[in-house]
Amino acid sequence: MKISPFKLERYFARHEFKADYLLCSSDCESLAIQDLLALEPGANEQFLGHRLGYTESEGSPSLRREICSLYHTIKPDQVLVHSGAEEAIFLFMHAMLEAGDHVIVHWPCYQALFEIAYSIGCQVTQWQAREENHWELDVDELRRHIRPSTKVIVLNVPHNPTGHLLSHETFQEVNRIAQANGIILFSDEVYRGLEYRPEDRLPAACDMGEHAVSLGVMSKIYGLAGLRIGWIATRNPEIYARMAILKDYTTICNSAPSEFLAELALRHRAALVERNVGIVTDNLAVLDQFFQRHADQFIWQRPKAGPIAFPRLMGEDVEAFCDVLVKAAGVLLLPGSVYEDCRNHFRIGFGRKNLPDAIAQLEAFLHQRRG
């Protein structure tokens, strides 16, 4: 397989563990293992006694049962657990796509959501979310993109990198279009549950019918990226079976300690999410004030969900700005070029507790440059 380098991951590989402040992280504040175990009496003893043998390739039955509680219609045998979301994306694309198939992708997006399809030999159409439309998608444009060879629509709700969340009406229409045309809807929902207003939360796509696959992960809203546990949920037995067969050629099964801790975290997900929503909303207030003070330099489109947003820098090149910033002030932002964006946007992350300190460093850098 020939595939292009993953721009975002290569960028992080250069800077992530050297920068003092990661002001572009896509996940929320993490926990220590001892903090997670403290959520439940007896969990520490159970963890220490947990067997380190092979696990079920589909994921442990108890973990899959816990994941089912995130959905309304999904049963444990409709959940397939993976090593993070990335493996799930990779296996879905290889299980369901062939050279010549057409894929429509919510754009801009995480590179894996289109690059793997390219590497298979698929044709990919970008379904653009536009800043001037507040990052909302146009369903009429989706209809125009559909071809006889369209196999998959890739949707990301809530959206990385903009933090946008589709309206309920648009989401329902996307599902109707996919069903009416016999197209698979692959819905990246790794930020679902981190909406600022609970009434904005969309249904999970997998609950909408057999045409859909929902992607979830422990990394983002729970802040447990180190567990490397993700999953897909689908009521489509063919999709499930094809992905399960391919998983035998990748990770085979998941880490036993990680599955134990993921299950524990999901049992207490309400507390974890409440904590991280609090951090995110407090940090959003800091960002609102920062971008108001610097409205001459940045265009701020306030997000609706999740711990990331996609502001635009004015007056200078964003790649050069990010490069100087991390070298001079130790603050890491992610230039939009890693998303193939050419309009000078950058990703900012606000799911970490140290955001106020990071913003203070960024502001000091801006003041210093102004003299």
Image (tube, grey):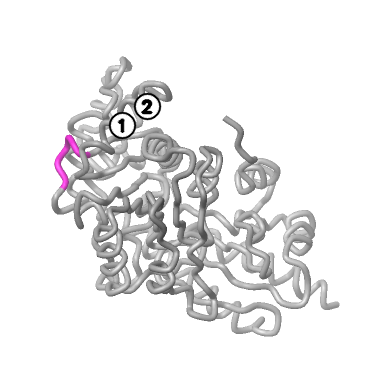
Furthest residue in direction front, as rendered: 148
Q: Which span of residues is magenta-colored?
A: 74-78
Give the residue at x 54% y 54%: 25
Of helix, strand and loop, which mostly describes the magenta segment? Answer: helix
The three-letter code of the residue at mark 2 reads Leu
Task: Say left or right for 317 vs 350.
Answer: right
The three-letter code of the residue at mark 1 reads Arg
Percent from the top left, x then y, of residue 74? 16, 46
Q: Is residue 120 above or below residue 357?
A: above
Task: State the CA–CA distance, disc 1 to disc 2.
Answer: 7 Å
Task: Say left or right for 353 vs 203.
Answer: right
Reading the image, the residue beneath label 1 is 242
Q: Quadrant of the N terminus?
A: top right
**Structural crowding at the residue carrying mark 2, measured as other residues with C-alpha within 10 Å and reported as few (<14), some (14–19) or many (≥20):** some
Q: Nearer the viewer, residue 352 or 323?
A: 323
- The quarter holding residue 171 reads bottom left
Determine the secondary structure under disc 1.
Answer: helix
Give the residue at x 49% y 43%: 117
Q: Is residue 257 above or below residue 274?
A: above
Residue 227 visible? The answer is no
Do callouts 1 and 2 mark residues in contact (Cβ within 8 Å)?
A: yes
Percent from the top left, x then y, of residue 83? 40, 33
Furthest residue in direction right, as rendered: 371
- The quarter holding residue 68 reads top left
Reading the image, the residue beneath label 2 is 246
- Checking the image for residue 93, the label placed there is none
